[in-house]
Image (cartoon, rainbow, N blue to C red):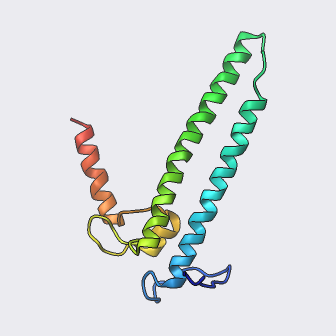
Amino acid sequence: MKVETFIADEYRPAEGEPFMNERQLEYFRRKLQDWRSDLLDESRSTITGLQDGTRNIPDVADRASEETDRALELRTRDRQRKLVAKIDAALRRIDDGEYGYCEVTGEPISLKRLDARPIATLSLEAQERHERREKVHRDD
């Protein structure tokens, strides 16, 4: 049985602490869970809005504009769906004890990077190398 770690609302992980200690893990777990919850709430409101928003618009230009807006909203929700999957993966990494470490180098990912992008799986250096390789191959 997991014992819940108490952290104050104003707590922020600091470089002077042991890396990925219980407080830091709980901080990132809560941050990820809150983010996930927000995304799912937005998704539910979008679904409700799309269901309620179906109406017959006689003007072709207005109808096209509304369909464009709906398509954009659906694309946004699809990106958010993929983001929820990444959040779930990050939560699993926390449970498995792998969170906060670069998938390529095994080195710790900086706390600043994790705070800004809690789903990060690569250190900044590994991410930059990945993007450079991707750019080179994209130009082929």
Quadrant, the N terminus: bottom right
- Say whether residue 132 is left or right of residue 97: left
Q: Which of 4 and 122 is in front in this view?
A: 4
Image coordinates of residue 47 in percent, x first then y, are 69, 38
Image coordinates of residue 15 in percent, x first then y, are 46, 84
Q: How many labels does the image show?
A: 0
Image coordinates of residue 18 in percent, x first then y, are 43, 88
Q: Identify whether 65 is placed above or below 82.
A: above
Q: Which residue is drawn at 31% across and 51% down?
A: 131
Residue 7: image quadrant is bottom right
Q: Identify whether 63 is placed above or below 36.
A: above
Q: Nearer the viewer, residue 50 or 16?
A: 50
Image coordinates of residue 90 in percent, x first then y, are 46, 63
Q: Which residue is drawn at 58% across and 40% down?
A: 76
- Say whether residue 133 is left or right of residue 102: left
Quadrant, the C terminus: top left
Q: Which residue is drawn at 47% across and 89% down?
A: 17
- Say whether residue 23 is left or right of residue 46: left
Residue 3: image quadrant is bottom right
Residue positioned most to the left: 140
Q: Identify whether 24 is placed above or below 103.
A: below
